[in-house]
Image: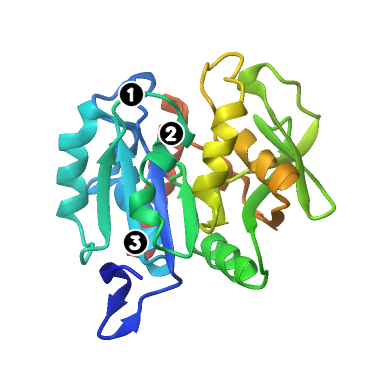
Amino acid sequence: MPWWARRNGRLRNDEICAVIPAAGRGSRLGIDCPKILAPIAEGYTVWSILRDSLMPHVGHIHVVVSPPAAHLMESATMAGPHDGRVSMSVQQEPRGMGDAIFGARNSWSQFRRILVVWGDQAGISGDTLRRAVASHALGSGPRCTLPVVEMERPYVQYVFADGGLEEIRQSREGVRVDDRGFSDAGIFLLETGGLAQAWRQYARIAPAGAITGEVNFLPFLVYLSRECAWQFGKVQVADPSEARGINTPEDLKFFQDRFADRLMTSR
């Protein structure tokens, strides 16, 4: 166990390292900074909200950014409360989420579990994180726990069968989805044992996405289920907004308004 997972001689939290692949730019949002640093309210960004949500549930947070964002993100990660529990690395070329996650394996491989969190999921709740960690802890062996939301025509649809993940259908790759189905909430909790080796094997045979041209992370989950016999558990999330990423100005405005309401209520 790495040094940052201990405090006063005791293990910190759940032996979980959160990894946030956040190399996306904010150009579609009309902001001059990476999406993870998009402003939500005065003194709050997507990053600071994610950090505060994750800290009670993980031992460490590692953020992966693009080269142009490195200086800004380094300042942001070091500015807030972190107690030595936050680190950052740079994805030199935009090769997709999988490359970002496994390029940072030195930061998470010493932990027992990895919590992958998309860098624009400002709606993640503490309740969902608690339930995901608790559900995952009930299992044994190689496994993944997915918080999911049932919705109409999901952008990404997850099809489960017999304790496994049968299929992931991605609209962005031109695949048709059902009228109603499960979508993820941008959170993926996995065991780390054997994970990097499985990715190397998968990356050698995986086709690039038809539209993105990337070896995507999500189809890797299906590979883990079908070829490596990983179990997949789902935790159903009641609030569909937790599955909403920040991809458009409308998404950003939604979370700015929502967070402003929460701040007013807390006063």
Q: Residue at x 46, y 37 (%)?
A: 254
Q: Kindly identify which residue carries mark 3.
A: 60
**Which is more toward the observer, 173 or 125?**
173
Judge whether residue 264 can be spotted in this image.
no
Q: Residue at x 30, y 76 (%)?
A: 6
Which of the 4 image quarters holds residue 18? bottom left
Percent of width and height locating residue 128: 56, 60
Q: Residue at x 63, y 55 (%)?
A: 144
Q: Secondary structure at mark 3?
A: strand
Whole-Å distance between the Cαs marked 2 and 3? 20 Å
Of the residues tagged 2 and 3, which is closer to the observer?
2
Please state, as top left, top right, bottom left or bottom right, where the C terminus lies in the image. bottom left
Of the residues tagged 1 and 3, which is closer to the observer?
1
First-in-chain label (2 vs 3): 3
Judge whether residue 47 can be spotted in this image.
yes
Q: Kindly identify which residue carries mark 1.
A: 93
First-in-chain label (1 vs 3): 3
Q: Residue at x 15, y 36 (%)?
A: 71
